[in-house]
Image: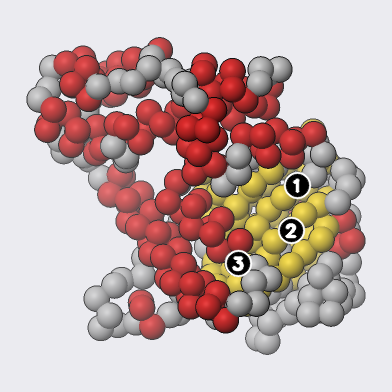
Amino acid sequence: MNALNPPAFAKDQKDLSGDRRGLMRAPGEGGVGFGPSGFRLPHRAIVDISPPDIADRRLANWGAIQADTVKVTRRDAVEYGFRAERHLLIAHERAERHKGETLIEGLPKSTQREFNCKLSFVPAGHRFYGWETPRVLTRVTYFYIDFRNRLFEPGSGIACPTFSPRLFFFDQALWDTALKLKAEVGNSDPSSQIYVEALSIVLMHELARLERTAHAAIRPVRGGLPVRQQKRVAEFIEEHLAEEIALNTLAKLVDLSLYHFARAFRQSFGVPPHRYHMTRRMDRARSLLQRSALSVTQIGIQIGFRETSSFTRAYRKFAGVTPSAFRRSRED
């Protein structure tokens, strides 16, 4: 398969209610768009995957949000596409490819080969298309989101923003909520519905928060750290990743009081210093788990955890899986 001559999607596919590998069309979501080389891209209710029998899929419909968990079962070339009148949040839990490309309308095409533990967002009406030859068996969850919700109605006091496309980004709060929702797929316990409704509201608010934050970042930031100081602080954290770094130490680097430094750092980086430091630690751990022969304990020590149990808890909170489970998933 290549970008110039992608195979056409299968036209006749069974409803997911009868076959988890098929596709479901929602009433009123017809029409077609066009992928590379002009092939027809249906306005599907859920993401089209071709060939359809390459993945096991489970679908859960919770009203404003629908979840679609996908596990690719073989390393053959695969193609996917989506365009509909609802938003699409993608949680790429396990995603590595030998070659391929991903496109979200409004953004440059990406040929990135590794995007484990990343998120993507496709606003309603935007085209999403990709093809790849997997290096590992892909695991991804699609969340189809309808913001036409009473929480965002006029008079609610909560404005629904206009969303921008995002490809391969990470936000800890959004990631955590997405994984909690995924865990409820297939849960028939009556109490699960109340929990899912609450999580759905949280997920929508997290997306709205992320969009508002992004727009705020476009405006000139008053009180943030100058670029030179941002670089100095970030480099210091990288050089001392395995150490406990006191806030006072970072503040002295740029000659600011603790209060003003903490405020300026958050304005510049979007998160408090301790969260930024922990995120960089976990990013380093993920890289080591993927590429080194070190044990989980040794990796934990390298990034500053004296006990394996502490490292395991921190990594699970960050990635949704334990370090050992993440490493095993790469060996499947």
Give the residue type that dot 3 points to: Glu
Vertical order, 290 against 218 (above or below): above
Give the residue type that dot 1 points to: Thr
Which residue lies under the disc numbered 2? 70
Mark earlier in primary sequence (2, 3): 2
* Residue 268 appears in the figure: no
- Mark 3 or mark 1, which is nearer to you? 3
At 35% across and 49% down in the image, what residue appears?
214
Vertical order, 246 against 272 (above or below): above
Q: Tell me which corner region of the image, top left, top right, bottom left or bottom right, holds residue 159.
A: bottom left
Q: Tell me which corner region of the image, top left, top right, bottom left or bottom right, holds residue 99.
A: top right
Q: Residues within 10 Å of mark 2 (few under 14, many from 20)?
A: many
Secondary structure at badge 1 equals loop
Which residue lies under the disc numbered 1? 138
Judging from the image, the colouring scheme is secondary structure
Q: Seen in the image, is 98 located left or right of residue 191?
A: right
Q: Which mark is residue 184?
A: 3
Q: CA distance from mark 2 to mark 3?
A: 14 Å
Question: Does the residue at mark 2 contact the one at mark 1 (Cβ under 8 Å)?
Answer: yes
Instruction: Estimate the x, y position of residue 258 in percent, counting from the top left.
Output: 13, 28
Vertical order, 233 against 68 (above or below): above
- Hey, which residue is sitting farthest bottom in the picture? 27
Along the line of sight, which residue is nearer the eye, 90 or 57? 57
Mark earlier in primary sequence (3, 1): 1
Instruction: Estimate the x, y position of residue 174 in percent, counting from the top left.
Output: 46, 54
